Image (tube, rainbow, N blue to C red):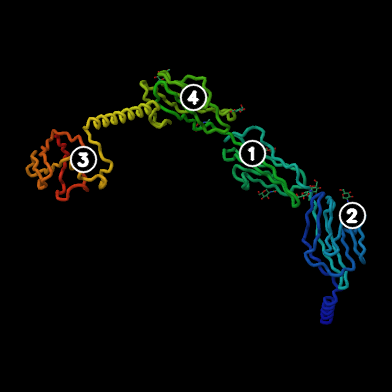
Amino acid sequence: MMFSCALYGIILILCIEIGKCISQDLLFPNSFNGAVGGSVEFTLYSAPPSNPVEVNWNFGVPFILRLKDGVLNIQPAYQDRATLDTTTLTLKLINLRFNDTGTYKLSVTNKEGIYNGQTSLVVYENVSDTKLTGLGKPLIETKSIANITCDGNGNITSVQWTKDNNPLNPSDRVFFSSDNKSVSIGPVIRSDSGEYQCTLANPASSETAKLNVIINYGPENVLIDGLREVGLGQKVSLSCSATSVPSASFTWKFNGTDTNVNTETFTIDKTDLTHSGDYTCTARNNVTNQKNDSQSHSLVVKEGGGGDNGGDGGGGGLTTVAIVGIVIGVLVAVAGICGLIVYLTKTKKIPKVSLGKNKPTKQAPPRRQEQELNYAEISHDKKSGGEGVIPGNMNESKTEYAQIMHGTSAKPQAPPPPYGNQESKPSSLPEGVTYAQVMKRS
Ligand SMILES: *[C@@H]1O[C@H](CO)[C@@H](O)[C@H](O)[C@H]1NC(C)=O
Ligand SMILES: *[C@@H]1O[C@H](CO)[C@@H](O)[C@H](O)[C@H]1NC(C)=O
Ligand SMILES: *[C@@H]1O[C@H](CO)[C@@H](O)[C@H](O)[C@H]1NC(C)=O
Ligand SMILES: *[C@@H]1O[C@H](CO)[C@@H](O)[C@H](O)[C@H]1NC(C)=O
Ligand SMILES: *[C@@H]1O[C@H](CO)[C@@H](O)[C@H](O)[C@H]1NC(C)=O
Ligand SMILES: *[C@@H]1O[C@H](CO)[C@@H](O)[C@H](O)[C@H]1NC(C)=O
Ligand SMILES: *[C@@H]1O[C@H](CO)[C@@H](O)[C@H](O)[C@H]1NC(C)=O
Ligand SMILES: *[C@@H]1O[C@H](CO)[C@@H](O)[C@H](O)[C@H]1NC(C)=O
């Protein structure tokens, strides 16, 4: 026992040292995939042994090619399909066929020993002609079951479905066939609408088909939008809307009687009193074969223009006629006021007002004004509460004063005179004094 163990150990060590007793591994990926008509390159993970004396690539028993003493020998069956990279020892096969599927072995001999490795190839037929089918009749919400099938040619090893780019998962309404090539959805609801994709694949290729699914429903929420009150002789439009796939078509009733209007909008170009009444629209969906009525919409045509707008209507307030009327009225009023001012100014009921009224007017010397104007100082004696005006400071000898009765009947038509402002007021006069301009007549 002891002896055989020791011998084995010695042999092992010798083998490792010399490298000729056991074959060493050449590392490949476990398997390669190829497509019919395509190509494959069997490339080593590990560095190839240096200075090979002999290289053999085998498929089953017969060799594909052999490199010995620098001479490459390729089997006639592989003459046009196999090549060897003498540096990396990679075998490349082109124009792959199904029967290339199998195990490939490489053996390399050099001075150190023999190296072996193997891997496998699976050749798939590319996926082609992928299509989604199954939607014959239009799908109607809550009534239809969608039954979609994905088909294609080639070797199909996986089937995957998405809806609007998200995975389509089984649920209480979504069932997949055992091979996943068919999906049954139903009863359908409107959110089942969307783009369905199926991807058929094998390790060498894949192909995707798309199908737009439309779920038809409605009409629902049939609504009339428009004025409820309108003036006589005006244009009015009522519009009908509905939630519907496909879009609904519309018909209109007035006071319960069919009109021949079959557009979305019911338009009255010029209202008269006979247009007052109840309007109803009916929406129809020609795929679901359903119809639905709106609530009735009452319209009142009001005599005497005006045209108050109704509660839910459009029109935000005044009619054009009213606006024009107001504008004209304002213009007339402004013109009248201007005329009055001009008249009063010309007839000197209003003095011409200096533009520099509120600024110290240095260019207008006070002396010149003093020649033409006289001052009256008027103090209101509030304690007396009466009409009497007590003359103020009369210490300026050059100035002539007039006593002015502050009567309630006197209309203060004129604005204060230009010199009555704060800046030009004589400093000797107390604050809160009222000035009146008095023209001195000769
Ligand atoms: C198969 O599919 C692969 C990947 O899509 C492609 O490279 C190859 O050319 C295809 N082969 C044929 C024969 O169409
Ligand atoms: C592999 O298939 C090709 C045709 O695809 C055929 O010509 C060839 O003989 C087959 N090879 C073997 C070993 O059966
Ligand atoms: C869906 O289609 C498959 C294949 O055509 C069929 O076997 C199945 O009965 C259909 N299912 C429904 C609900 O129509
Ligand atoms: C691919 O399909 C062919 C026939 O359609 C079949 O013979 C072959 O075994 C399939 N290959 C794989 C890898 O499924
Ligand atoms: C079908 O698809 C589901 C996931 O969507 C997967 O778990 C299942 O293995 C697939 N079945 C087949 C036969 O491909
Ligand atoms: C009619 O409209 C109502 C409310 O919008 C809705 O509940 C009903 O399902 C609709 N009828 C049809 C046939 O779509
Ligand atoms: C329509 O009905 C309204 C109210 O029901 C009624 O006042 C009006 O006269 C009717 N108009 C016509 C033209 O029948
Ligand atoms: C339904 O109506 C639309 C227009 O709204 C029209 O294009 C379509 O052809 C109609 N379909 C049927 C089945 O009548």
Q: Judging from the image, what secondary structure is the residue with disc 4 in?
A: strand
Observer able to see residue 104: yes
Mark 4 or mark 1, earlier in chain: 1
Residue 118 x/y as whole percent = 82, 62
* Between 273 and 140, the one nearer to me in the picture: 273
Q: Which residue is mark 4?
A: 266
Q: Is residue 44 left or right of residue 424?
A: right
Q: Which residue is mark 2?
A: 78
The reply to whether the C-beta atoms of the residues labelled 1 and 2 are less than 8 Å apart is no
Q: Judging from the image, what secondary structure is the residue with disc 3 in?
A: loop
Amino acid type for the residue under numbered disc 2: Tyr
Of badges 1 and 3, the one in the foreground is 3
Residue at the left extreme?
A: 384
* Between 193 and 314, the one nearer to me in the picture: 314
Crowding near the residue tagged with mark 2, few <14, some 14–19, many ≥20 C-alpha atoms within 10 Å: some
The residue located at (12%, 38%) in the rendering is 406
Q: Judging from the image, what secondary structure is the residue with disc 2 in?
A: helix
Q: CA distance from mark 1 to mark 2?
A: 47 Å
Amino acid type for the residue under numbered disc 3: Pro
Q: Residue 417, which numbered label?
A: 3
Mark 1 or mark 3, earlier in chain: 1
